[in-house]
Image: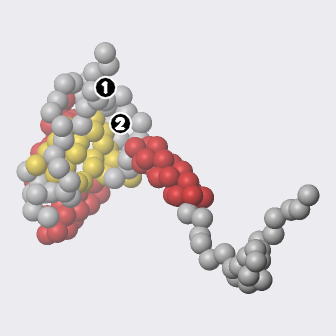
Amino acid sequence: MAFGRLSRREPGTGIQGPSGPMSDINMTPLIDVMLVLLVIFIVTAPLLASRLKLDLPQAEAAAGAGPGAVLAVSIAADGRVYLADEALPAAELRARLEAAARAALARDPATELQLRADRAVPYGRVAELIGWVQGAGLTRIGLVTEAPTQ
């Protein structure tokens, strides 16, 4: 019983077959790794959107605006206001909000502010913050809610 070898002689000719190194790359492991990384990014991307946990009100709403520049402001249940997940006192928030609005509007005139407010926050506090935002020059304001559970 004979075992096969990588290089064989052609029967009857005495010529040895191809015995050089294999130059083909097996792409299957590379594609598998890329697909795993893609799944990891798809799963973790929504988790990175906001680290601040709010109990958002539920409402049926249309889909959000298309891609564009977005500023994120959040109001927690205890009244603290966050600009891009950074808690700021009221005086500093107004100054930082105006600077961020000027910079964002210079890049994209259709910049939108996405306001996330906990359902326990009084309406007066939300209205006050909307006034600050409009004073900073932003006119497109989106109120972020959760989709109702069915």
**Left or right: 124 as drawn, with respect to 31:** left
Bin the neighbour count of mark 2 within 10 Å (Cα to Cα): few under 14, some 14-19, many 20 and up: many
Instruction: In the rendered structure, find residue 120 and report the number of the disc placed on it.
Output: 1
- Quarter the C terminus occupies: top left
Q: Residue at x 24, y 37 (%)?
A: 144
Q: Residue at x 21, y 24 (%)?
A: 59
Give the colour scheme shown.
Answer: secondary structure
Report the front residue among 146 and 18. Answer: 18
- The percent coordinates of residue 13 (x first, y second) are 74, 82
Report the front residue among 2 and 136. Answer: 2
Marks 2/1: CA–CA distance = 8 Å
- The percent coordinates of residue 32 (x first, y second) are 56, 54
Report the front residue among 119 and 51. Answer: 51
- The percent coordinates of residue 28 (x first, y second) are 57, 58
Q: Residue at x 18, y 37 (%)?
A: 63
- In the picture as drawn, the residue positioned furthest to the top comes out as 150
Amino acid at dot 1: Ala
Using the rendered view, name the quadrant where residue 94 is placed.
bottom left
Report the front residue among 29 and 94. Answer: 29
Using the rendered view, name the quadrant where residue 114 is placed.
top left
Residue holding disc 2: 76
Tell me the SS state at disc 1.
loop
Amino acid at dot 2: Ala
In the depicted structure, whether residue 96 falls above or below residue 42: below
Q: Is residue 37 visible?
A: no
Q: Is residue 55 visible?
A: yes
